[in-house]
Amino acid sequence: MKTGSPESDSVVRDRLMGLDVAECERARVRRDRRYDGRFFSGVRTTRIYCRPVCPVKPALGRNVSFFPTAAAAEVAGFRPCLRCRPETAPFSPAWLGSRTTVDRAMRLIRNGALDREGVERLAERLGIGTRHLDRLFQRHVGASPLQVARTMRVQRAKRLLDETSLPMAEVAERAGFASLRRFNAVFAEVYGRPPSQVRGRG
C-alpha cells in the first residue's frame, strides 16, 4: 500500500462531494449520525481513521484530516479504528449520485470482480479504458480500483472475524483473498496486528 503524509485539506475538501472541512469537523465533534459513511477522519498523531460516530474522545481538530472513503484513508497511511469499526459504516453517498460509471464499478468490485479478474477486465465491462477508470476513481473515491478492492476484502474479513467462528482459511476465502498467507499479510498491514489477535479482542 502506498503511504505518505496526509493530503492537504483543500485537496481532501474537493473529494468530499459537497462537504467542506468545517462541516466535517462539526459532524465529527458532535458524532452526528447523519454523516456516518459520508466521510472518515484520520488522526495524524495515532495514524488511525474513524467514522464520525466513533465513541472515542474526539482528537484535536488540528491533528485531523478528512477522507471521502475508507480506502482513501488507508492510501494515506491510516489504520482502521477497532472501536468504531469503519467496515460497518453505511455505504458512502460519495459513491452515488450522477457518477454512474464509478457507482457501477463499485457494485462490481463489491461483488468480487477484482477478486477473480484484473482491472483491465473491469474497465472492459464498463466500456472504458483502464487509465480513464483510474482517473474517475481518483477523482470520486480518492483511491484506485485495486486499493478499493483491497479495502473491501479486509472489511469483509473483519466482519467475518467479529461475527463468526469460521477458521481463518475460510475467512480468507470468503473475503476474496487468493491465499491464507496473503490474507494474513494484508490484514496485518492494514490493522497493525494479525487477524488472530483482532479476533482475540472480540
Image: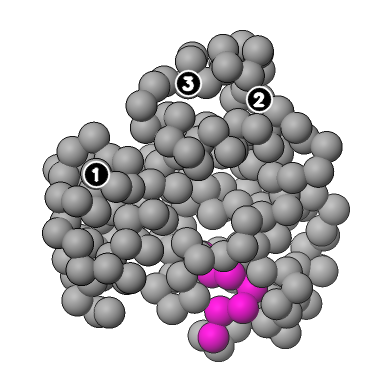
Helix, strand or loop status at disc 3: helix
User: Residue at point 54% right, 69% down?
Assistant: 50
Residue 173 is marked as 1
Q: What is the distance, in whole Å, between disc 2 and disc 1 at their CAs?
A: 30 Å
Residue 48 is marked as none
Helix, strand or loop status at disc 1: helix
Residue 5, how many percent across, how many down?
52, 50
Residue 135 is marked as 2
Residue 105, by quadrant, is top right
User: Residue at point 81% right, 43% down?
Assistant: 97
- Magenta region, residue range: 47-55
Q: Amino acid at mark 2?
A: Arg
Q: Are marks 3 and 1 in contact (CB under 8 Å)?
A: no
Q: Can the viewer see residue 7 in this picture?
A: yes
Mark 3 or mark 1, earlier in chain:
3
Does the magenta run of residues contain 93?
no
Tell me which secondary structure the magenta stretch mostly adopts: loop
Q: Amino acid at mark 1?
A: Glu
Label 3 Cα neighbours within 10 Å, binned few <14 / some 14-19 / many ≥20: some
Query: Which of the two marks, 3 or 1, is nearer to us in this view?
Result: 1
Left/right of residue 108 with respect to residue 126 in the rendered view: left
